[in-house]
Amino acid sequence: MTAQTSPQDAPRAVLHDIRYSRFAGKLRPRRSAVGSFVASGIRRPLGLRRSASAKIWPFLLLAAAYLPSLAVVAVPLLVPAVRVQPTDLIDYPQLLTTNSVVLLAFVATSIPSMLTRDRRDRVLSLYFATALSWVEYVVGVVLAAVALLAIIVLGPMLVLFVGSIATAEAPGTWFADNVGDLPRIVAAAALVVLFHTALALAIGSLTAKRVFAVGGYLAVVLVGPALTGVVAAVTGDDWPLSLDPSSGPIRLATTFIGGGLGDPGVLAWVVWAVVVLGGFGVLAGRYAKGGDA
């Protein structure tokens, strides 16, 4: 017969720490997770850290957005005989209007899809259970979208402003005389950026399909001008143009930096407020549930 081993003589179980390595680094605060999320949200639409083909479209749009301001700055810099200020060749309202098509193309192909990918891959529950709350997630996406659109909208106007200083006969005097334009430039850019951020993200939050999100945004900004144009032609008045989601924010923005497109009227401000507040409200409502639905 085989002798039975008493409990006292049985070998003791030993845990070997060979599969996982212990974390010996310093734990960072939650705001670092939000910062990393914002940084990744900016990099992906620009194609950074991705293949070369992913960079072609966004950088073509960036080049198109900056080309007008760089061109008018380069003329007096490269040809000293030309005594003309860049703002005399193209002013801020004209620059905003010129870049409006580039802005719509960039928003359509970049901003709505910032949300669809996470819904499609069903990772929201994982996000909200670990590093990010739904509020931090929404804030991170909004900050990333605002930063991206600021590159397109605010960046060219700042290039025009700085270039005007560099090409002035008395740069210090020109800056002192025109420094008051900076707050108006930032305010004008903020109007356009916040409008399209709220609109595009609200549409992107409603679907997990990128094609539907892009198509929905394009439908709003392309069909809208056609409808408002028809109504304006029928009524013989300009007030329907205030409802145009494509040119409306540009018309509002130009009121801060010299006009050029006429008075947009009170209705345009109402539409802007409804779209921005409503868009962010839809965004919050969709993610407050904390799931992938």
Image (cartoon, helix red, strand yellow):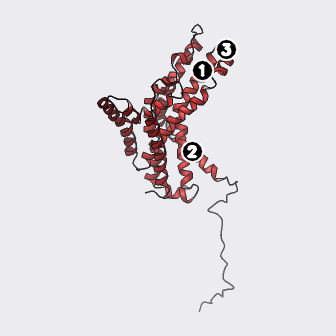
- Counting residues from the start of the chain, the first of labels 3 and 1 encountered is 1
Q: Label 3 sits on what residue type? A: Ala
- Counting residues from the start of the chain, the first of labels 2 and 1 encountered is 2
**Which residue has dot 3 on it?**
170
Residue 48 seen by the camera: no
Where is residue 84, by image quadrant?
A: top right
**Circle 2: is it few (<14), some (14-19), or many (20+) Cα within 10 Å?**
many
Q: Which element is circle 1 on? A: helix
- Residue that extends furthest to the bottom in the rendered view of this protein: 1
Picture residue at 47% right of the left edge, 51% below the top: 118
Picture residue at 61% right of the left edge, 28% below the top: 182
**Which residue has dot 1 on it?**
163
**Which residue has dot 2 on it?**
38
Q: CA distance from mark 3 to mark 2?
A: 40 Å
Where is residue 168, by image quadrant?
A: top right
- Residue that extends furthest to the top in the rendered view of this protein: 81
Residue 12 seen by the camera: yes
**Circle 1: is it few (<14), some (14-19), or many (20+) Cα within 10 Å?**
many
Please state the horizontal and vertical placement of residue 192, each as a whole percent of the image: 49, 35
Q: Which element is circle 2 on? A: helix
Between 263 and 16, the one lying in front of the other is: 263
Between 172 and 15, the one lying in front of the other is: 172
From this view, report whether residue 16 is shown above or below residue 200: below
Number of the front mark, 2 or 1:
1
